Amino acid sequence: MPLPYAPPPKESKVYRDLKNLKISGVTAAQLTALKEALFAQGIDGSEDEMRRLRLLGDITNQTSSSGPMIGTQQIIQATYTSTGDDADFFKPTEGIWQIVGGDTVTSGGTGAIAWSLKDSDDTLAMVFQTTVNGQEPITEPTVGMKTPCFVSPENWLHANITTVATSVRASISFIRVR
């Protein structure tokens, strides 16, 4: 069913820009670029383009309005060898990502990492802390919190190594939810 009062699909920038792709070839980055070119005023066909973007996002599984996005989960891993190491652990370039779980592994004794959200002003907000002698899972990244932990390009996950014997390795899985 065509959109009410919409210009024909052949005049749609969304469809013109993606016309040579199969549904399985459309990416979240392409949809984001098209979305960012739209004006929010909803006139001159932009409301129809918004609907088309929403439809394509849903059909291609490249956007989500109800949960994680398929094909986006990844594991980030880093090894630290000095107490006082201070590093950005995961700073996505786009979207909102949720921590799924992970683990920390030490060699040569105890290791501890203070995990914080960090912003561009270098403001830190402590999220959780892991202390381990051997290997321990991060099964509840919400320790001390009642909600899941999300990271974005504006607030990313930062690691401060508070204790390390020989080395401490952290592995955390993230999935994009928006």
Image (tube, helix red, strand yellow):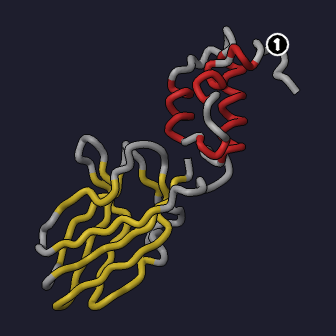
Quick check: 18 above or below 107? Answer: above
Q: Is residue 121 visible?
A: yes
Q: Residue furthest right?
A: 1
Q: Which residue is at 17% across, 78% downward?
A: 163
Residue 90 pos. (x, y %)? 34, 57
Q: Nearer the viewer, residue 125 or 9?
A: 9
In terms of image quadrants, where is residue 83?
Answer: bottom left
Is residue 173 toward the left or the right of residue 18 in the image? Answer: left
Is residue 104 toward the left or the right of residue 7 in the image? Answer: left
Is residue 125 toward the left or the right of residue 150 in the image? Answer: left
Q: Count how many numbered circles sit on residues in the image.
A: 1
Residue 92 pos. (x, y %)? 38, 49
Quarter of the image that includes the N terminus: top right
Q: Which residue is at 32% across, 77% downward?
A: 130
Q: Which residue is at 54% across, 41% downward?
A: 28
Instruction: Please name the residue that numbered disc 1 is placed on.
Output: 5
Identify which amino acid the numbered label 1 is placed on. Tyr
Quick check: 135 above or below 56? Answer: below
Q: Nearer the viewer, residue 142 or 88?
A: 88
Residue 146 pos. (x, y %)? 53, 66
Q: Is residue 64 visible?
A: no
Q: Residue furthest top?
A: 44
